[in-house]
Image (cartoon, rainbow, N blue to C red):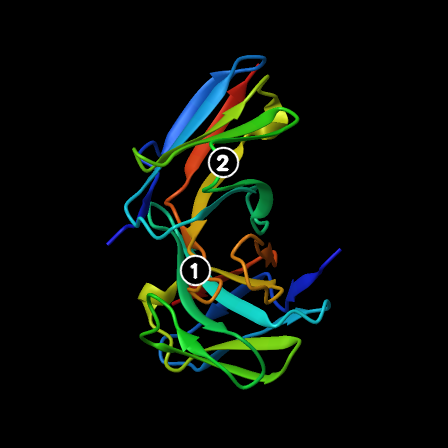
Amino acid sequence: DVKVTQSSRYLVKRTGEKVFLECVQDMDHENMFWYRQDPGLGLRLIYFSYDVKMKEKGDIPEGYSVSREKKERFSLILESASTNQTSMYLCASRVQLRAANYGYTFGSGTRLTVV
Amino acid sequence: DQQVKQNSPSLSVQEGRISILNCDYTNSMFDYFLWYKKYPAEGPTFLISISSIKDKNEDGRFTVFLNKSAKHLSLHIVPSQPGDSAVYFCAASATGTASKLTFGTGTRLQVTL
């Protein structure tokens, strides 16, 4: 089975700090994604990456950046954490296929609290 | 602009009965639909999917129905079990859109004894 590992389950950071959320997958998947989950808003796409060193903005990229230096690792960076970035962050990966008919494998999530 | 909507934030069903979760979408380019289940403090896990060339897909207790003309899909769980209590997300994708999934807002299902 594909495993997607997020380095931290819970994080508490101060406003203004630079925050790194790490995600590693072990099945050589090309595509990786970062979502955040908020009550009443569902899962919203922050950034995604087709392959190494490639990145694309999702629906809510403001205040975030990403890094994909190696195929297995996709990092989400909060440049200057703010309280409205308190959320559950979910990383996912999938194989690059021509058709859309293949879903994601998610990590367990990182619950980030910014105080 | 919420392209995938789940209008019921919560649903309570008795054990053994049918659970019906609904999802509506607005983007006519969506051609593949998935349901994910999420327990607290865990990532979502894939449950069942359906291609737009079908109107029904069944997997054990879970059946997904797609009505393309109404841009509506539903997930039926029969019979419902207490372990089905979770948040269910509907998701959709369109071929050629870089594999992105667009998720709904989720429905919390509570299966009571």
Q: How many marks?
A: 2
- In the picture as drawn, the residue positioned furthest to the front comes out as B53
Q: Check the residue under mark 2 and report the chain it is in.
A: B
Circle 2 SS class: loop
Q: Amino acid at mark 2?
A: Lys
**Image point (42%, 56%), residue name:** B94
Q: Nearer the viewer, residue B23 or A96?
A: A96
Q: Nearer the viewer, residue B61 or A114?
A: B61
According to the picture, the residue beneath numbered tag 1 turns out to be A36
- Which of labels 1 and 2 is toward the front? 2
> Which quadrant holds the N terminus of chain A?
bottom right
The correct choice, above or below, for A39 with respect to A79 in the image is above
The one of B54 and A110 positioned closer to us in this rendering: B54
**Residue B76 coordinates in the image, percent (x, y):** 50, 25
Q: In the picture provided, is B100 more to the left or to the right than A99?
A: left
Name the residue: 60% across, 62% down: A94
Neighbor class of circle 2 (other Cα within 10 Å; few <14, some 14-19, many 20+) is: few
Q: Are marks 1 and 2 on the same chain?
A: no
Residue at image x 55%, y 30%? B85
**Location of mark 2 (residue):** B54
